[in-house]
Amino acid sequence: MGQTIFIPREADAMETCVATSPDTMKGLAAFGFDIIVEASAGTLSRITDDEFSKAGALIGKAADAAKADVTAFSMEFMPRITARSRWTCCPVRPTSPATGR
């Protein structure tokens, strides 16, 4: 089992982004990450739980954040959450070890 990334449903009803997409998740899995996506995290982005599952994520609940090494939030939401959160926050986008991009 590798490092675990938790993708929560955004707490702000105005936030329509989710921290990662199924395509990005495939790249993270290729780097050895395990990914847990909170149920309905992608609803406002029109990404279904089934799409996340097919990309290799486990669908979980908010309490699963405690199992994660990293909790990722969307870039727009990050400044608002970091001030009141003890979780590690980051935008998620895998880079190539060869190119750094």
Image (cartoon, rainbow, N blue to C red):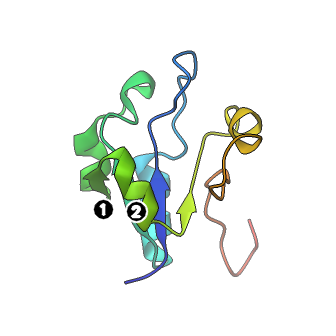
Residue 50: quarter of image: top left
Q: Position of residue 56 (x, y in %)?
A: 30, 62
Residue, disc 1:
56
**Other-residue count near label 2 (Cα within 10 Å), few / some / many at <14 / 14–19 / ≥20:** many
Q: Are marks 1 and 2 in contact (CB under 8 Å)?
A: yes
Residue drawn at the location 55% of the way across and 30% of the way down: 17
63 with respect to 79 (left or right): left
Q: Residue furthest top?
A: 14
Q: Position of residue 31 (x, y in %)?
A: 51, 77
Residue drawn at the location 50% of the way across and 55% of the way down: 24
Q: Is the residue 87 above or below the residue 14 in the image?
A: below
Closer to the camera in the image, 68 or 48? 68
Marks 1 and 2, how far apart at CA: 8 Å
Q: Report the amino acid beneath label 2.
A: Ile
**Other-residue count near label 1 (Cα within 10 Å), few / some / many at <14 / 14–19 / ≥20:** some
| Circle number at residue 35 | 2
Q: Report the amino acid beneath label 1.
A: Gly
Sequence-first tag of 1 and 2: 2
Count of labels shown? 2
Residue drawn at the location 43% of the way across and 22% of the way down: 44
Quarter holding the N terminus is bottom left
Residue 40: quarter of image: top left
20 with respect to 78 (left or right): left
Q: Position of residue 11 (x, y in %)?
A: 52, 29
Secondary structure at numbered mark 1: loop
Residue 96: quarter of image: bottom right
Q: Nearer the viewer, mark 1 or mark 2?
A: 2
